[in-house]
Amino acid sequence: MSYLAELAANGALVGLMYALTALGIVLVFKTSGVANLAQGALAMVGGYVMWWFAAALGAPLWLAIPLSLVVMFGVGRGIERVALRRMVGQPVIMIIMLTLGVEILLRGAAPALWGAVVKRLDIGIAQQPIVLGDILINRAYFWGGLVALLLIGLSLLFFTSRQGVVLRAVADDQAASWAVGIRVERAIGLSWGLAGVAAACAGILWGSVQGVDWTLSLLLIKALAVAILGGLDSIGGVLVAGVAVGVLENVIPGYVDPLVGGGTRDLVAATVILLTILVRPFGLFGREDIERV
Amino acid sequence: MFYRLAGIRHTSYAADRALWPAPVDRVQIAALLLFALAAPFLLPNLYLTSYLLPWIIWSTAALGLNLLMGWAGQIHLGYAAVMAIGAYGAIHLVRAGVPFEIAIILGGLLSAAIGLVFGFAALRVKGLYLAISTLAMQYLVDWIISHVPAISGGSQATLQAPAFRVFGIPIADDRARYYVALAICLMVTAFLLNVGRTSFGRALAAVREKDFAAAVIGVNPYRYKLLAFWCSSLLGGVAGAVLAFCYYRAVTPEQFDLDVSIQAVAMVIVGGMASVIGSYLGAALVLLAPIVLNNLVGALAHALGLPLSADVLSHIPLILYGGLIIGFLLIEPLGLAKVYDNLRNYFLVWPFRHARR
């Protein structure tokens, strides 16, 4: 029983970090209806930028983290300004391919720029696990999950602020927002910037766990699973789905791997996506108006 | 100029329906065909096996994907998985003693059967959701292939393609393999050149433009979406089998991973949706550009005396694929085919630009 509890607890914390990545997908989809398939690569770039500030330039942590968040905000906005804005009104297949193109470009450019070897990213979290009764919890996961939870809570709060209300209005109806004087492009740009920030946080947290290299961009498939399961336009959904995917992804391999010889971990996210799309395409908390044939 | 036409004017319905209305097009096609047939005797072996052969095989694959993405307007991010199914299926069948001709068709049918499962997702959802579910299927198929020893021959294993014969002729050297690939490429090309003129092709176009509008005019979108997935997966499976038998001559799961899917999608987008010549041009650009750019950057760095790390060189293909996809989507969404078409239209009536085309 404590084996199960340990797997589930660690999984839930990892899931919170997935949820943080998925937050960027949801934010962008909510405001502009665009699928952000570049989120994995944004997380990777976030990790690289943080490493560059902290290890290569030698900035202290309290400076490096905010700096990399600011840089990633700029990167997110830049992607929207340079690429996405010109694609308004194009078929959805084109826009999806464009974000995928950004993902591929970044996935090649970042290792080319900063080197492909795994970089160690130390954000001051000790190695030894937290002992809680008879279960062991990875300390990095614990802090990562906590920070992720905090940030997701913050983004929920953000939606009650003035800017947040603007984002909600744009999400609801772009034309009507235009009519009442909201600058829609600006709101969409903001959502991309926030997606960049969420990706950077996820990249830094996850990078401190497994090191920074291109494999950080594999967070994309997990984040997609979380976003789809939670419903693409629900932030609360991201939280629940993140924990669910994280727990499944830790518990299932814990029991099934010994039977089939390993590797089921990579399968869980893909299976979650497929089952969700087949059974309930709008996810747990999404709006039910997703267009069907 | 060399078109010697001032616009195309048809005097009969047969001329109107012709695949290549201008005589110069026919000459061009004939010349290209002759070159393709004579290439093994004209080109050094290196060029034949490392440029021409992969180009025609990848063009076959790109044509298959273009049927789905260009003609039917469905997105597919798991095409490499479909190709892998065809490749593994055909190799296992040939190993079991099935003749090659039948094995690649059966491999293709196996791909088509599994591709239909991808298609069922398309019935439920579209656009973004379809993209993500095909992406998930790519992971799933990859995992199954590499983790089931009966298929891949154990993890990290390479499955050698056995020796094979086509219609009793043993296919032993590079030339013979080239001709096998060429024959299949020509068949697929002929199919796609004509698909736009059939009721099937028109139905696909109707579904692509608006599925419920298609339903209103009596085209069943369910049926035609599934048919599009079936057809395109069949072609992908055959292309995968040819790739495995004629080019790699062995299969490993890594030959068909997600990056390969993205490469195939890049070929279609860079080449141009719903264009046969575009598929060829796209495949050429996506295959050759990384090689050319790699050499160019290497030479440039050498000439300027800049130390260039292996990391940069090894990531050039990815940067290029991403850059090509972004660039073409932003600047020329109809791809190289449109560029070619613009040139052709210009020269069609050159120097009399005022003439009606």
Image: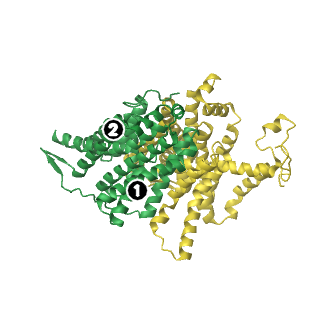
Chain colours: A green, B yellow
Number of numbered discs overlaid on the protein picture = 2
* Image location of residue B160, percent across then percent down: 47, 55
Residue B238 is labelled as none
Q: In this view, does B151 lie above or below A229?
A: below
* Image location of residue B81, percent across then percent down: 48, 45
Residue at the image position 63 percent from the left and 61 percent from the top? B48
Discs 1 and 2 lie in a common subunit: yes
User: Residue flagged by tag 2: what amino acid is it?
Assistant: Leu
The residue beneath circle 2 is A157
Mark closest to the chain's N terminus, 1 or 2: 2
The residue beneath circle 1 is A214
Q: Which of B339 and A279 is in front in this view?
A: B339
Neighbours of disc 2 within 10 Å: few (<14), some (14-19), many (20+): few
User: Residue flagged by tag 1: what amino acid is it?
Assistant: Trp
Judge from the rendering whether residue A183 lies leftward or rightward of residue A206; answer left or right: right
Neighbours of disc 1 within 10 Å: few (<14), some (14-19), many (20+): many
Q: Disc 1 is attached to a residue of which chain?
A: A
* Image location of residue A74, percent across then percent down: 45, 52
Judge from the rendering whether residue B246 lies leftward or rightward of residue B40; answer left or right: left
Residue at the image position 73 percent from the left and 53 percent from the top? B33
Which residue is farthest right?
B11
Q: Which of marks 1 and 2 is in front?
A: 2
Identify the element where label 1 is drawn.
Answer: helix
**Whether residue B29 is visible:** no
Q: Which of B94 and A144 is in front in this view?
A: A144
Identify the element where label 2 is drawn.
Answer: helix
Q: In this view, does B131 lie above or below B165?
A: above
**Whether residue A220 is visible:** yes
